[in-house]
């Protein structure tokens, strides 16, 4: 077997690729820390920061979003539109597991 390799003598410059990340946090309507596997209390607020836009967006139960489902659906639409490379959260184990949206 005869294998040919192309030799790279020198790379003049590495261009960094920007990474888009969304940092999100959820709040749950309860006084105590709920169990993620039960998710028995409604998500009452979601806040997300987009590293490209450098903007913070918040969804909360209230005037425009009258159900937890519509709030989570709106947040999922936001994530699909932004297409982040990475999702981050303050307490990712809790937020990701509790929201059950991804």
Image (cartoon, rainbow, N blue to C red):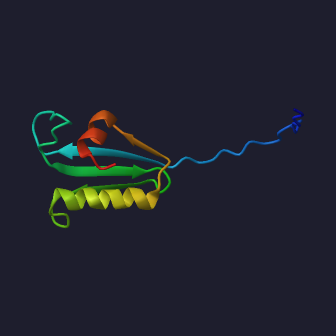
Indicate the position of residue 97 as horizontal and vertical percent values.
Answer: 27, 39
Indicate the position of residue 13 as horizontal and vertical percent values.
Answer: 78, 42
Classify residue 26 by image quadrant. Answer: top left
Left or right, residue 92 beside residue 32? right
Q: The N terminus lies in which quarter of the figure?
A: top right
Q: Is residue 1 above or below residue 71?
A: above
The residue sitting at the bottom extreme is 64
Q: Nearer the viewer, residue 72 or 15?
A: 72
Q: Is residue 88 above or below residue 69?
A: above
The residue sitting at the front extreme is 1
For image coordinates 63% across by 47% down, the residue present is 17
Classify residue 8 by image quadrant. Answer: top right
Q: Nearer the viewer, residue 34 or 50?
A: 34
Count the labels in the image.
0
For image coordinates 22% across by 62% down, the residue present is 70
For image coordinates 27% across by 50% down, the residue present is 46
Indicate the position of residue 9 as horizontal and vertical percent values.
Answer: 89, 35
Left or right, residue 88 beside residue 31? right
The residue sitting at the left extreme is 31
Indicate the position of residue 37 as horizontal and vertical percent values.
Answer: 19, 36
Q: Nearer the viewer, residue 76 or 21?
A: 76
Q: Is residue 75 above or below residue 64?
A: above
């Amino acid at each position: 077997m005869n294998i040919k390799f192309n030799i790279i003598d020198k790379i003049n410059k590495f261009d960094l690729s920007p990474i888009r990340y969304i940092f999100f946090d959820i709040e749950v309507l309860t006084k105590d820390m709920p169990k993620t596997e039960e998710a028995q209390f409604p998500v009452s607020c979601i806040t997300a920061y987009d590293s490209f836009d450098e903007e913070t967006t918040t969804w909360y139960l209230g005037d425009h979003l009258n159900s937890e489902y519509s709030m989570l659906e709106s947040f999922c639409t936001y994530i699909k539109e932004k297409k982040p490379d990475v999702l981050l959260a303050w307490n990712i184990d809790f937020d990701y597991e509790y929201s059950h949206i991804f």
